[in-house]
Image: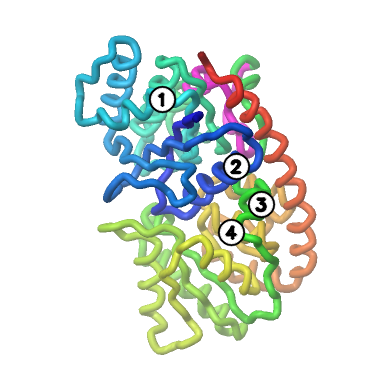
Amino acid sequence: MNKIGVFGVNFDNKGAEAMIITLNEYLKKNYSKDFKLIVFYDSKLKEDFVNPSKNYLIFQGPLTFLNHWLFTINTILYKWLRIIPFYFQTKIVKEFSQCSLCVDLSGFALTDDFSKNSGTRRSLIFLSQALASKLTKKTYIILPQAIGPFKRKLNEYIVKFIIHLSDLVYNRGKYKFKLGRRLKSKCVKTTDIVFETSFIEKYELKECKDFENKVILNPNARIYHKSVSGELYIKSQVEIINKLLSNNFNVVLTPNEIRENEIDDLQICKMLKDNFKDNSKVILNENIEINNLLNLISDSKFIITSRFHLMVFSLILNTPLIVISWSEKYYDIMNSFGIDKYCISDPTKAIKIIDNLLSNFENVKQKIKINLKINSQQINESLSLFLKLLNNPSK
C-alpha cells in the first residue's frame, strides 16, 4: 500500500474538493498499485473520517502558523530519533511518516496574491510543509498552481526556496517573476488539474442546454473583503442582476465556498437576494455539492463567476461565461481558451460585456470546445511525470 500525503485541501471550497477528487480518480485509472491519499485537512474538521471511495483518509491537519512548524519539528524528530515531543500531533505525525510522497494541492503555495496582509506567514507555512517532506526523505510535488505574483520580495525568496526543495512543480499559467535555469528545470507548465479527463468522466458531464433562460451569478466574498467598500461591491452585483432581469433571464445566486462565522459567499448571496425579496426570478441556491453545481451550470445559458473552479466547471461544460477576476490566475486560464476579453477585474464593466457575450455566443462556445481538448491533453501528458516520481519515490 503506497500512502501519499496531501496538503492544502479542505471541502469548504468546492474547487479544493474537485482537485482532490480529480487526483483520486486519476490515480485509480493510471496507477497500478494500491494507494491511499492521506489528507491533512487545512480547515476545522469535526472528526477524522474515511471517504467512501476507500482511497483517502482525512485527518485534522495543523491550523495555525505555530502548529505547522511544530508539525515540521515533530516529523523530523520522529524520523531520526523516534520521538514526538509535541504529542498532541502524534496521530498525524505517524500517518505522515508512512507516506512515501507528498503533494500540495492548495493552489496558492507559490504566491502571496491570496493574502489579506503581507502573505509572509502563509509562505512560511508552505515552506514548513516542504521542509517536513524533504528532511524526512520524501518526494515533494507541488501540483498545478500559479507561480507568483508577489507583494513582498521576501515572499518571492521563500517561494524560490520551496521550489528548490521540491522534486517537481506544476506551473498553471505564466511565470510572474524571474526564475533561474536550475529552478525552472523543476517546473512544468500545464493547466488546472480539474481539466484532466478523470473528473469529466466521473461525473459524466454534459454540455449546457442553451435554450434554458437561466444565468448563474456567483459572487466572491474575497472580492467583497478586498473592496474599498463592501457596499459598492454589493451595488455592482445588484446592477448585474437588474441587467440580467431586463434581458428576461432568471438569475440563480450560488456560492462556491461556505465558511462558519464569517461573511462568505453564501452570506453575499443572501445580501443580494434581500434586494430582490419579492422577485421570483432571482433564486438563491444554497446547495454547493459538486453534482448540484455542475447541474446548475449545465442548465444555464451562461454564468458570471468570481470563483476559479466555477470558471473551470463552466469551461468543462462548454457553458459561456464572464469572469470577474481578482487575480491573474483567472486571466491565464481564460487566455488559454482564447476568450480572455470576457475576464474583467472591474465588476462595473460586466454589464457591457454581457451584451458582447450574447452577440458572440456560438463563437465563444466553439472556442471553449476546441481549447478544452487542448487543456485536457496538456494536463494528462504533464501528469505522466508525477506518475514517474510516484513509481520511484525518494528512498
**Residue wearing tag 1:** 98
- Residue 342, above or below 352: above
Picture coordinates of residue 134 (x, y %)?
A: 45, 17
Report the front residue among 329 and 294.
294
Q: Quadrant of residue 30?
A: top right
Instruction: Say few, some or many: other residues with alpha carbon within 10 Å of mark 4 (under 14 / 14 to 19 / 20 or more).
Output: many
**Residue wearing tag 4:** 323
Residues at circles 1 and 4 in contact by the CB criterion of under 8 Å: no
**Residue wearing tag 3:** 334
In the image, residue 167 lies in the stretch drawn in magenta: yes
Q: Nearer the viewer, mark 3 or mark 2?
A: 2
Residue at the image position 43 percent from the left and 39 percent from the top = 8
**Residue wearing tag 2:** 28
Q: Secondary structure at mark 1?
A: loop
Q: Quadrant of residue 263?
A: bottom left
Residue at the image position 57 percent from the left and 78 percent from the top = 244
Residue furthest top in the image: 81
